[in-house]
Structure formats: structure tokens, C-alpha cells
Amino acid sequence: MSHPERARPSGGESVDTIAEPPALAEKRAESLAEFAARHGLTQSAARPPLRAYVRQLWQRRVFIWNFASAKSMSMYTSSRLGQVWQVLTPLLNAGVYFLVFGVLLGTNKGVTNYTAFLITGVFVFTFTQRSLTAGAKSIGNHLSLIRALHFPRASLPFAYVIVELQQLLISMVVLAVLVLVTGEPLSPRWLLVVPALALQLVFNIGISLVVARMGAFVRDIQQLLPFVTRAWLYFSGIFFMIATLPEREGLRDYPWIGDLLQANPASVYIELVRTALIDSYRDDLAAYSWGYAHLWWYALAWALVAFVGGFWYFYRAEDRYGRG
Amino acid sequence: MSDAPEVVIDPTREPIVVVDDLHIIYRVYGSAGGGKGTAASALLRILRRQNRPQMKEVHAIKGISFVAYRGDAIGVIGTNGSGKSTLLKAIAGLLPPHSGGVYTQGQPSLLGVNAALMRDLSGDRNIVLGCLAMGLTPEETRAKYDEIVKFADLKPGFIHYPMSTYSSGMGARLRFAIAAARTHDILLIDEALATGDAKFKRRSKAKIDELRKDAGAVFLVAHNLDVIEETCNRVIWMDDGRLRMDGDPREVIAAYTEATGK
């Protein structure tokens, strides 16, 4: 529970009481720590038990939602176009990648509807990427709030992922329109997007909690994260079909590379959304006899592992946030 | 250490904060001191496993013990750098003790000058979020909202402006109003009222009395000795990280005034 430096036998006033008259010393047979314990006093700001912590966090759900909404609202207030950027940012991103990878490099090997394929990948990945970046800053940027009021600190990473979720929902509307425009039919399979994104949300909360703790104590994480997310971006099959990799020259002898890339969480969530939204993509995958039903299990496993592990990791340092 | 007053426990009263031979040593990072700030020198330092040269250890609290009881309003006085704010941070649990311990009943809340809530959000948003963060339900928040706005007594319209546009006095008033909306077991006030005007000081004194009646203990750090004498029933005088005197406000303040030659 407590810190190693606290775990010293509490001698109370021993230093001061050496030269005391016997009468006073007798009154102090009990040390101050024992006196405190007898009256039910506890170490200041100790970490609450896990169950109490989860209950407190659940109690703050209205705070988390309100905090996220307030952040979303104030995010673009200083720019002239304001909330329009919520739609423009993902669109411009997709435009740049389409120009480079679709037009200039022509990576669209094996994909019938490359535009929908690429934009879906970019939008879904952005959700994870931004959750990670925001999570790393969630504690450091709110030290004054943490030092002023007592609340479960995990509320902050949670709130930041909710901000990104609100952004994602806007992106998803844009995405739905784009997918329809590129000629894909509207089908009941689209409903599968909901559980896929829900699992991704749980996964994102988990990894945000991990980087939130790291970012709170080692600010260098914020400098490092852009490189991590960029590397992750290129390995997640956003610009190319992972299914085509084992066919490629030089990679034919290493079929496990394709399996490994496919199991990576970002790619799992992207593929699930793609197979739900893009009709022609399911046929593209079938052409490489590449299945996707098992990805649901990967998605579930990643979400559970990240969330439980991340929550536990964050909770273990609860009493130290705010010291900076 | 011989001039440190003895801790005498009053068995008839209920303790709410026990500080037991507390030592606080914290690290400060600053550009002061030697050492070149280049990338090469930083790398060499890491290779040699040295600490950052700018890092210094400060022994801010050097063995403090006292017991505060339910219903106490304790003023903490001392010259700049005597460790008053550090003591409050330690009681709030924001600084880990190097040795010794702080034991409290319930959760202490620290109200400091720098405790800006969310600067980019408007005052009314801050009220709602602050109340929710403290664990009030949405209904309680709505019920308290008007009271907070009235107590903070901002200029008309300012409640809808971002807090970054507030003057330091306005910000302090709003923060105090939000924190005072809930009963606290232990309330630690660090110079938060110093920026308020005379009218606000009067009202905040009434509020502190009310908070004292409701529950636990109030700690007040202030340089204004009149405020301390009016508000507190007990005063702690700190000198260079040690407890110099602890007792009746008038006696302690008289001794302090004499010693500092005011």
C-alpha cells in the first residue's frame, strides 16, 4: 500500500523525548502513529481499494461525459472554421494519403475499391492514434485540477478517449457517405461496425491508461509517441492489403509476417470495420482465401487484455499522480 | 530541536489530523547552477548514470509533529520559505513524506492560489465540472449552482467567459466558492483568500466558520496576521521547516511579531 520510504518503524517522538521528564514520557507510551491508528485515521491520500476505486469512477461517469463534451467544444474555438475542422481534419488526411499511396505509388494492388479501403483504414486508425496521444497528456496537462480536487484520476484518460470517440462518430458519418458514393451498397452488415468500434473503444481506453501513467512521470513519452504511432500506422495495413504480403517477392518464405501483421490490434479493428462496410472488400479477401471471422476473437482478446492490464497499471500509481 | 514544543495529546477531543515526525525532502529541477544544457552533455550524464546537475534536494520539513482536532481552525504562519505550503501539500497527500507520516480522517482538500481549474473553459462549465469531479450528483450540482455563482460574486457576464480571462482575485473567488460548495473533512487553504477584496474576506470568514461547524478542521496559510487572528482558534508558527510554536493565536502571533521585528 504505502511507499517504501514510509515503511519504517514509527518511533513517533523518540528523538524529542530522550531528555523528557519521566512523567511526560509515560503519557507518551503510545506513539503518534499508534494514537492515529486507534482513532481510525489513515495515511493521507492513500490509494483506495480497487473495488472502492471502481465504484468512485462509476460515480464520476457524468463528470467524464461532461468533461469530454466541454473539451470537444473548446477544441477548435480558436480557429475560424471552428467545429468544421472535426470533419475537415479526417477528410484532408484521407486526401493526402490517397494522393500519395493511391495515385503516385499505386499501392492499390488487389483492392477493388481503394478509396473506401484507404479512408476506412485512416479513420479507424486515427481513433486509436489520437486516443494514445491525448492519453499521454491527460495527467500532465491537468496537474492543477488534480491538485485542487479529489477524484479518481482515471477519469481523465477515460474522458480523453470519450473526446476522441465523439470525433470518431463524426468521421463515421463522413465515412458512410464516402463509402456509398464510391458505389458500395448499404447493407445490414453495416451494423457490425458498432460492436467493432465498441471493442476498439475498450482497447483504446486500456492503452491510454498505460501511456497516461507513463506520461505523468516521464514527459519524454510525449516526444516519443509520434514515432511509435507512425511506425504503427505503416504496419497496420492501411495503405496495402496485408493479405497480399505473403505473395510478394522476398516475403514468400516468411508467411508468419502476414499473420503477425494481421493480429496487430490496429489492423484487427480496421479489418473488421472494412469487412462490415465495404462489400467488394470481402470478395477481395476471398480471392486470397483470407478469412476474417476469427478477427472477432482477436478484437475481443485485445480489448480485454488492454483494458484490464491498463486499468490495473494506472491504478497502481493512483496515489502519486499530481506530484509531477 | 530543544525549542520545539512538545505534542500534548488532549484525550477529550477527537483527532482529525495527526502529523508524526514528518520530514519532507523534495527534488527541484531548475536551470540554476552549473552544467551545460546541450544534448551531448545530457547524453554523457546518462551514460555516467549521474543525476541531472540542475536537480537539487531540498529538506523542506525537518521533523514536525502535531495533532489537530475536529473543529479546529489552525493558522499556519512563518516567513517565506519556512515550509508552510509544503506542510499543507503533505497533509493533502500531494508530497510523499521522506520519513514520518501524516494520518487523516477522511480526505483533505487543498485550495491553493495556483489551483486554476480548467483555464480554457468558461466559469459556469468550471462550476459544473468542479462539482461533478468532487463527487456531487448532477441534481446536487444544479442545486448548488446558484449558490456558487452568488458567493463568487463575479461581474455580470463573466461567468460565461473562459477562466483564463479572469483576474487573479476573480479566479480565487470562484475556486473557493466551488470548493466550499461541498463539506470537506479537512480543508487546507493556502493564501487563496489573499487576493480577495475586503468584502470577500468577510464572507469567506463566515464560510470558513460554517465549514468548521459542519465537519473537520480548516488549515489556513496567510501572511495577513489579522485574518489569522480573527479566523483561527490555534496558530502554528513554522521556522525553517521546524515547528517553533503552537498554541493560542494571540500569544503565538505576539511572539512571531516580536521575533520578526514587525
Image: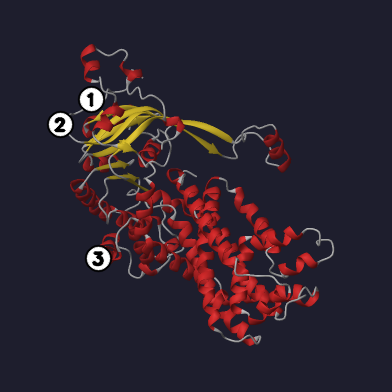
For the C terminus of chain B, the image quarter is top left
When asked about the image quadrant of residue A296, the answer is: bottom right
- Name the kind of residue labelled 1 in the image: Val
Color encoding of the figure? secondary structure
Q: Earlier in the sequence, mark 2 or mark 3?
A: 2
**Spatial CA span between label 3 and label 1:** 43 Å
Q: Cβ–Cβ below 8 Å for labels 3 and 1?
A: no
Question: Residue B12: which disc?
Answer: 2
Q: Residue placed farthest to the left in the image?
A: B12
Q: Nearer the viewer, residue B253 or B91?
A: B91
- Name the secondary structure under disc 2: loop
Q: Do marks 2 and 3 share a subunit?
A: yes
Is residue A82 in view? no
**Spatial CA span between label 1 and label 2:** 12 Å
Q: Say left or right for A252 vs A143.
A: right
Q: Position of residue A209 (x, y in %)?
A: 51, 54
Q: Position of residue B247 (x, y in %)?
A: 23, 30
Q: Position of residue A176 (x, y in %)?
A: 57, 81
Q: Position of residue A323 (x, y in %)?
A: 46, 43
For the N terminus of chain B, the image quarter is top left
Is residue B9 in view? yes
- Kindly report which numbered mark, 1 or 2, lies closer to the viewer in this rendering: 2
Which residue is painted at 56% across and 84% down in the image? A187
Q: Is residue A40 above or below residue B243?
A: below
- Name the kind of residue labelled 3 in the image: Ala
The residue that mark 1 highlights is B8
Q: Earlier in the sequence, mark 3 or mark 1?
A: 1
- Name the kind of residue labelled 2 in the image: Thr
The residue that mark 3 highlights is B143
